[in-house]
Image: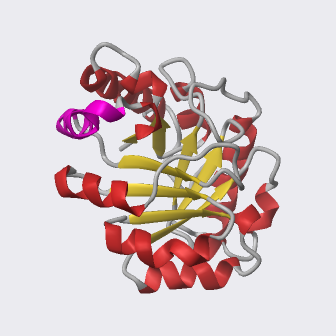
Amino acid sequence: MIKIAPSILSADFARLGEEVQAVARAGADYIHIDVMDGHFVPNITIGPPVVRAIKRIATVPLDVHLMISDPDRYIDAFAEAGAALLTVHVEALPHLHRTLSYIRSLGLKAGVALNPSTPVSSLDEIAAEVDLILVMSVNPGFGAQSFIPRSTVKIRAVREMLDRIGSRALIEVDGGIDLQTAGAVVSAGVDVLVAGNAIFATPDPAAAVRALRAAGEQAAAQRPPRGNA
C-alpha cells in the first residue's frame, strides 16, 4: 500500500492544527515535518516546540526530516518532542552508522536522505541499518519546486540495492510530487509520497490526499511484487 505524508512546509501555519487534523482524517499515513537550519539548506523553518505542538493533535506518526548541519545535537530533543521517524542526511554526518544506531536505540525508526547530487553508492555500508531511504527529487530548502526527472533513475537504483540485500526499508520521495509525478516515482519503487504544495495549496487538502493515494495505488498495481523486480 502506498503511503502519503503531507508536508507541513506548504501548510497555512495560522491554521496548522486544523490542516494537520484534516489530512489525517483523509487517510494520511504520516505528517512530514521539514526541519531546516539556514546552514545545511538555505532556509529556516521550525524546531522541537512546533513538533511537540503537532504531536498533541496528530493522530498519525510524525515523520521528521532533519535538514540541519549537526543533527546529532538535536536527536534527543526531536525524539522527546514526539517524532516517530527521524531522517538525517548522509551528507551531514561523518559517523552515520553511529547516528542511525542511536536513533533506533530511542525506539524511533531511522531514515537516511540523499540530496539530488549524492550517489546511491554512499549508502552501500549502511543500507541494512535503515528503516527508510528518502530520495530528494528537488534541491532541498524550499517548497513548490519542480521535480528533477532523473530522480526516477535514482529511485530504481535504491530499490535494486534494497532488494539485493533483502531489506524491507521503505523508499520515500520528496520534491515536486503531485498527480503528474506520483505514478512515475511509484513505478520506480517508491513506497511513501511526500507532498506539500500538491496537498495544502489546493482548495481541499483532504481530497488531494485521497487523489494522490489513488494515483500512487494505480501505479503500484502495475509493478512486480517486491523482491522479484
Residue 228, relative to residue 75: is it above or below? above
Residue at the top extreme, as displayed:
203
Image side of residue 170 versus residue 89, left or right: left
Image side of residue 144 versus residue 7, left or right: right
Which SS type dominates the magenta stretch?
helix
Please provide percent x and percent y for residue 143: 57, 31
The answer to which quarter of the image holds residue 107 is bottom left
Instruction: Please report the bounds of the magenta region as a residue range.
Output: 13-26
Nearer to the camera, 173 or 80: 80
Q: Is residue 16 magenta?
A: yes
| The N terminus lies in quadrant | top left
Residue 181, relative to residue 67: is it above or below? above
The residue at the point 64 percent across, 41 percent down is: 141
Residue 75, relative to residue 211: is it above or below? below
Please provide percent x and percent y for residue 149: 73, 27
Please provide percent x and percent y for residue 157: 73, 50
The colour scheme used to paint the residues is secondary structure
The residue at the point 79 percent across, 65 percent down is: 122
The answer to which quarter of the image holds residue 112 is bottom right
